[in-house]
Amino acid sequence: MSLASVLPLEAASPAYICPFDQACSYLEAAAKELRLDRGIIEILSHPRKVVTVSVPVKLDSGEIQVVAGHRVQHSDVLGPYKGGIRYHPAVTLREVSALAMLMTWKCALLGIPYGGAKGGIAIDPKRYSVGELERISRRYISELIKDIGPSVDIPAPDMGTSAREMAWMMDTYSVNVGHAVPGVVTGKPLSVGGSRGREMATGRGAMIIVREALADQGKSLAGVRVAIQGFGNVGSAAAELLYEAGAKIIAVSNSAGGVFSQDGLDIPKLKAYAAENRKSIVGYPQAVAISNADLLTLPCDVLIPAALENQITEENANQVQAQIVAEAANGPVTLEASLSLEARGVTVLPDILANAGGVVVSYLEWVQGLSYLFWDEERVNREMEHLMVQAYHQVIQQSKKRQVSLRLAAYTLGVGRVAQALTDRGLYP
Ligand SMILES: NC(=O)C1=CN([C@@H]2O[C@H](COP(=O)(O)OP(=O)(O)OC[C@H]3O[C@@H](n4cnc5c(N)ncnc54)[C@H](OP(=O)(O)O)[C@@H]3O)[C@@H](O)[C@H]2O)C=CC1
Ligand SMILES: O=C(O)CCC(=O)C(=O)O
């Protein structure tokens, strides 16, 4: 039985690519390669717990609106559930379920003692005031109070959320239980027990993985031409760090479109422009305007999709000109597109590896909080880099040993570790 029979069907256009079906296909492929028992696959293809809550919010106008909030806990075989909370209009239960499953494999691949979860609310945060977002965040977490906790399920930021929302959530949880519980969320501001380095962590992790992949091809970051889709937390941090390392960032984009410069964008100037223009990069004077679709097919060495799922599909995969595609977003390349890119010799660095820097520093934040001892940024970055480089080499080794793609190598490692723990714990009926 697949989850399709458990999750309600959501509005589907003919072009709809179900993220949960994609996630299950990856699981199936890894399980086949590992010759896993059907019973184990059955367990792992179902989230352990799916919670949907109604979140009533009083808008500034006085009107009451009710939005749906989800939290999907895929697996806690290796430790507490872990994963971000997304605020985006396209959030669906199937998407959140897929992202929760990816978190399970990501944490296992990186060797951090967590399971996988994800949360989401189908709102466009740009359409709400700060006060409304605070009320939504607090009510959502109040509704989930019995399902989360520092040793149960630890949320973190994802698209549309940041340290600000994590502080509200930490406060709401703490007030509910009667004492401060910083460990209930990660990605918090430093003032309430956040970790140095968390804000840049996902982008930094992506930069490290790209650097390692280039090194394997006898190249360095210096002078490499990079295009980045998405200029939010992940995309802008990756752009900044790659720029500092000497790469030429020739294009970046956000939901409104992109900017391109043949000679490379001045990323600090572009960030300053975005800060002055309510995060918008559109209209940046020292570049040419391009569309998101154009960005993906630019001639460049490295393409970093750092926004939404399903951006590179069967439709445009054969137009991608980059030699390396680093999935800083979750699920930006579909299964079919991945196969098509790999068949052309393009290196696809899979999401559960390329964007794991965020959850690794979340783990380091949690460890620091639990031990009441906070590190300087240099130490946080060093510990993160160690885990990222180690995972990268494990994936490369696995890929060579099994003669499979990097994605399948990463999945076999993640899925294999969870399956092993499941069997050792005796949870396999
Ligand atoms: N934050 C984290 O620590 C982690 C995030 N990720 C993944 O990285 C991705 C990005 O997350 P994050 O940077 O945190 O999110 P943010 O909300 O900070 O930024 C998202 C960026 O994507 C842009 N965007 C949205 N829709 C589109 C579109 N249709 N085309 C092009 N760009 C678009 C946004 O543009 P605009 O500002 O105009 O809306 C914004 O620039 C997600 O897939 C997330 O799951 C993975 C691991 C950890
Ligand atoms: O930092 C975390 O705990 C989770 C980050 C996340 O949601 C992700 O890696 O997709």
Image (spheres, rainbow, N blue to C red):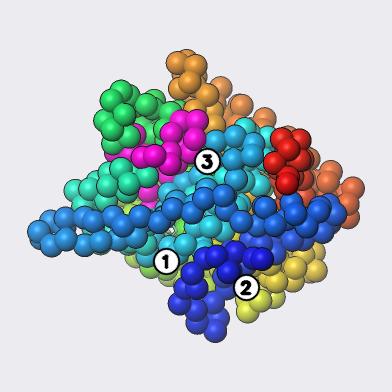
Viewer-nearest of discs 3 and 2: 3
**Residue beneath the point at 62% across and 76% down:** 316
Q: Earlier in the sequence, mark 1 or mark 3?
A: 3
Which dot marks residue 90?
A: 1
Residue 263 appears in which quarter of the rendering? Answer: bottom right
The location of residue 10, given as percent across then percent down, is: 47, 73
Q: Earlier in the sequence, mark 3 or mark 2?
A: 3
Residue at screen point 61% across, 56% down: 46
Rendered position, 398 above or below 259: above
* Closest to the observer, 234 or 297: 234
Q: Helix, strand or loop at disc 2?
A: loop
First in residue order: circle 2 vs circle 1: 1
Q: Amino acid at mark 2?
A: Thr
Q: Is residue 72 left or right of residue 110?
A: left
In the rendered structure, find residue 82 and report the number of the disc placed on it: 3
> Could you tell me which residue is drawn at 43 percent across and 39 percent down?
148
Q: Is residue 220 toward the left or the right of residue 274 in the image?
A: right
> Is ligand 2 within 8 Å of the beta carbon of the residue shown at mark 3?
yes
Q: CA distance from mark 3 to mark 2?
A: 28 Å
Residue bounds of the magenta highlight: 145-170
Q: Nearer the viewer, mark 1 or mark 3?
A: 3
Q: Where does residue 394 sit, x and y in percent of width and height? A: 78, 40
Query: Which residue appears at 36% of the width and 40% of the height?
Result: 145
